[in-house]
Each structure stands twice: as structure tokens, then as C-alpha cells.
Amino acid sequence: MVSHRVMPDVPRPVVEYLARLLAGHRRAIGTRRGTRALGPFRQAVLVLRWFRDHACVHCLAQDAGISQATGYRYLHEGIDALAAEAPGLAEVLQQCRREDLPFVILDGTLIRCDRVAGETDRGTDLWYAIRIKHFAGNAQFLAAPDGTPLWVSDVEPGSTHDLAAARIHALPDLYRAARDGLPTLADIGYTGAGGGIHIPSRKHPDLPGDIGISNQTYNKLLRHLRFPGERAMAVLKQRRRTLQHITLSPSRIGAIAQAALVLNNAWQRSLRKPQ
């Protein structure tokens, strides 16, 4: 068997950022110096390789010279350390108002996972997302008008409709933000969300004719404004390929997505930092 070591294509400041978080976690739980198989920096490299390349934990552990069980433990520590740094929705909306953003964009994403047991009240698979015909978790996210990801919710089973997930995780805070002058743009899946959530107009199924030229123009404008935000999660999934299919417990999807958001923010800061 031939072993090999690979350095992730991640800026060094991002690796150092995660290493500092992991070092802080070790101090918080009282880990004695020299008692871990890997130092914080090498543990950070293992975690980042998993996020970037969707590599199997067994292979990452083998490259690092540790057991598979230790590899999983180090990975989950990294996910938790990053997710703990993810901003809350109220905090994000306050920052948006301070920056005078004209609106935020709400959307949902389905993150594929392995088959999960569990049934809905109707007897169907709870985690099966009919929209993509695959088992998945539903995570809600907010993006800025320029497409920058701002916030990711915890996960709901894949059978959960976007509107139902938004009611659990996002709408109460978004209503308050709308009253303060920060509206939300969303797609047709959020029909019925309520005041302050702007969605496309639809033709009533029981009425003749089309929706009219004014509503068509409104829909085109709304679609144009929403487009960068709807790309935000797609870009995040390309940068962190593990978001394309989660092989850990589906209950971890929310924490993994939030950790990916924190990594993206750290990566953006590293690009702005003068060399």
C-alpha cells in the first residue's frame, strides 16, 4: 500500500484560524499538552481536507497516522468548533441594517445524505426529498444582494417544505427586520409567508387570463434581484464539496453547513487581508 500526503488548496490563514479554534477548545476542556496524536494545526488540515475534497475519514486518518476512531473524533471537534462561530440570524440582520442593505435573500437548499430511517404521518420516508428524489436534509439560508452567504439554519428532514422550515428557523426574525425596513426576497416556494417576504406573483388557477404585464415585470425584477443570492449556496457547495453529500449522521447537516459558512467567511477575510 502506498501512502501519500496532500495539502488542501486552502489559504494558510484559514488553516491557522481553525487551528486557533481547536487550540482554544483543547484549553477549554483541559487537554494537557502533548497528549494528542495530532497538534491543532495538523488536525485543522485533516478537517479542511474533509470539507474541501469530501475525502473518506478512513483515508484522512491513515494519511495522518491515526486510527479511524480518532479521525472521526477530530473531525467532529473541528465541525463543532467552526459551527460555534456561526452568526445567529438576529445578529446577521442587525449587521445588514447597520450596512444599509436594501434587502436580504431567503432560500432553501437540499443537502443529500445517506438513507435515513423515519416516517412522516403519511407513512412516507421522513428524510426523502421528492424534489431531488434522494434522501436529504433541508437547510434555510440567507444571502446578501451580491450573493454573499450570511446565515445557515439548522437542518430539517428533506420532506419538510421550505415554507415550513422557514417558519421554524427564520420567519419570526425576518418579520421584525421587515418592520425595521429590511425586506426579504424569496421564491414561489414561500407563498403565504406573510408581510415583508416578497415572492413572485402567480396566476390564480380558477381565473382566466394571464397575470398581467405589471405582474410579469415585477416577477422579472424580483428574479433578477434574487439570482445572486440563489447562487450563494451552489458556490458554497462547490468550495466545500462535502456539502454535496453528507455521509455522517444527517442530524449533523446543519452544523456542517454552518461550519462551511464560517470557513467561507474566513476565506473571504484572507483574500481582503493585505499581503
Image: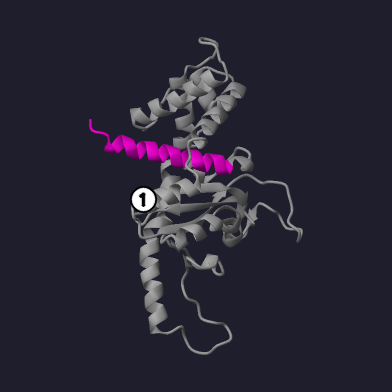
Residues 218 and 60: in front is 218
Residue drawn 55% across the image and 40% down it: 255
For the view shown, which residue lies furthest in the front direction?
180
Residue 42 position within the rendered picture, expressed as x and y whole percent measured from the top left? 45, 21
Residue drawn 51% across the image and 37% down it: 83
Residue 23 position within the rendered picture, expressed as x and y whole percent measured from the top left? 47, 21
The overriding secondary structure of the stretch rendered in magenta is: helix
Residues 46 and 272: in front is 272
Q: Quadrant of the C terminus?
A: top left
Residue 187 lies left or right of residue 7; in this view the side is right
Residue 20 position within the rendered picture, expressed as x and y whole percent measured from the top left? 43, 24
- Residue 257 part of the magenta-drawn span: yes
Residues 248 and 202: in front is 202
Q: Quadrant of residue 103?
A: bottom left
- Mark 1 Cα within 10 Å, few/some/many (few <14, many 20+)? few
Residue 165 lies left or right of residue 223; in this view the side is right
- Residue 47 part of the magenta-drawn span: no
Answer whether residue 7 is visible to the viewer in this image. Answer: no
Residue drawn 72% across the image and 47% down it: 117
Q: Quadrant of residue 254?
A: top right
Residue linked to disc 1? 98
Residue drawn 63% across the image and 42% down it: 251
* Secondary structure under the numbered disc 1 in the rendered image: helix
Q: Is residue 262 above or below residue 7?
A: below
Residue range (magenta): 253-275
Q: Amino acid at mark 1?
A: Arg
